[in-house]
Image (tube, rainbow, N blue to C red):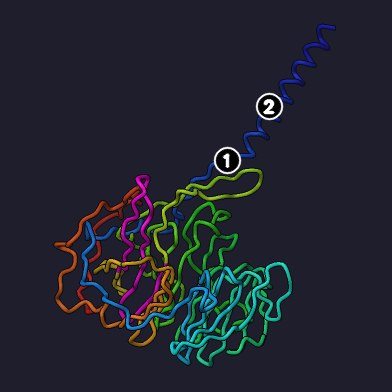
Amino acid sequence: MKERAIWALLGLLVLVGVVGGWATSRTRTIHPRLARELPEPRPQAATGRSLRPSLGEPLAVIATGPERGLTVPGRLRIVPDGSVVVVDYDDMRLERVSTGGGSDNIGEIEPYGEAPLGLANPMDLVPVPDGRLWIADPKAGGLLLVAPDGTPVRTVVPDHPIMRLAVSPSGRLFALTPTADGHLFEAYDAPGASPSATFGALIEPPDQMPYTTDGSIAATSSGGLVYAPRYVGVLARYDADGSLRYLVQTLEPVAPPTLVREDGRLRGDPEARVASQALEVAGDAVLVVHPGMTTDSGETPSAYLDLYSLEDGTYRASWALERRWSELRVAGDRLYALTARGIEIFRTPLLRVEPGEDTTASPSIREPAARGGCPLPSARGERDQEFRGVIR
């Protein structure tokens, strides 16, 4: 009898241990870190923003409110005919807006039904030189090619869900598509064929990448890629062969956000700071939109347009923005910003940093390097030489 009681007690202890282990495994905090193969991000020499004169009033504002039928505009692209294509995430449609005032509905987005265009959850889109659009829509099958009027042309089913797209002047297509082996990007010389290059890494463990590696990408004229993750305060440039040219901290470095796995589902820290809202390459410059974040006191710091050298990622200058920009595009001598007012169009030459101008020694506004966040590790060894070229 005594022996049976001992065995029963041991069984109860084992059961408690199993149940307790199962219960604790249901909620697990994950602390992503930069991938081991990456060099430490090089910090910026500047200790604060060097504010340039205001961008001034926009040359034009294209309304995107209810009168235009765009209630929650998301992605914005400039197509070869000069019109603007916007994804409306509220009315769930793809809209082409003319700078002259007209607009056309390209296609409906139907997440719970089958739309004529087949859109369900468009993540990004890019135009190609002939005016057609590549649309990344994992829920609708992958990568969709549509004619300028919205007529479906073809569908490409990639091996991994595509989050963001970029296209080089030569037509090379880049996709931000985190894979299980830790790679971030795929390049396609001919969409539909196998990737011509798979490259890039940012966060470990790799299965947490879809949240922590979401961000913005832009192609360079040489066939490379620039990347700014949304929740990690770094800027990376890759050459055409996929090799990392540089990894630098942005002016306000932000550490990877904490993740929580609960009941089999992964969620991010709701208090995570956004490091980069939008990214664009314009000539020799990289433009990054840093959004203002509401603080505990209820104050919302100004949003900024920060300019970095495309050559080596060195911070050069900033512009304070009167309104938050959710998207940014540059086409020719025009800069297009998506704001609460609509699509605001500025003259791109206002972004020029004149030769010989020192924009880092005496910034006109000084701020903590990592307001409310954890600074990333400092780089080993000597800092790279400061970029002395001309950004136009």
In the picture of the structure, the residue carrying the numbered disc 1 is: 28
Taking depth in this image into account, of 205 and 271 the one nearest to the observer is: 271
Circle 2/circle 1 CB separation < 8 Å: no
Rounded to the nearest angstrom, the CA distance separating label 2 from label 1 is 17 Å
Residue 1 as seen in the image, left or right of residue 320: right
Is residue 136 shown to the viewer in this render? Answer: yes
In the picture of the structure, the residue carrying the numbered disc 2 is: 17
Position of 23 relative to 200 (above/below): above
Q: Is residue 280 magenta?
A: yes
Residue 252 percent location from the top left of the image: 32, 57
Q: Which residues are magenta?
A: 278-306
Residue 335 percent location from the top left of the image: 36, 80
Position of 245 relative to 81 (above/below): above
Residue 176 as seen in the image, left or right of residue 318: right
Q: In the rendering, which numbered label is found on residue 242?
A: none
Secondary structure type for disc 1: strand
Position of 177 relative to 273 (above/below): below
Residue 344 percent location from the top left of the image: 38, 77
Position of 41 relative to 309 (above/below): above
User: Please, which residue is most extreme toward the right here?
Assistant: 1
Q: Is residue 336 magenta?
A: no
Mark 1 belongs to which amino acid?
Answer: Arg
- For marks 2 and 1, the one nearer the N-term is 2
Mark 2 belongs to which amino acid?
Answer: Gly
Residue 299 percent location from the top left of the image: 33, 51
Residue at left offset 62%, top offset 43%: 262
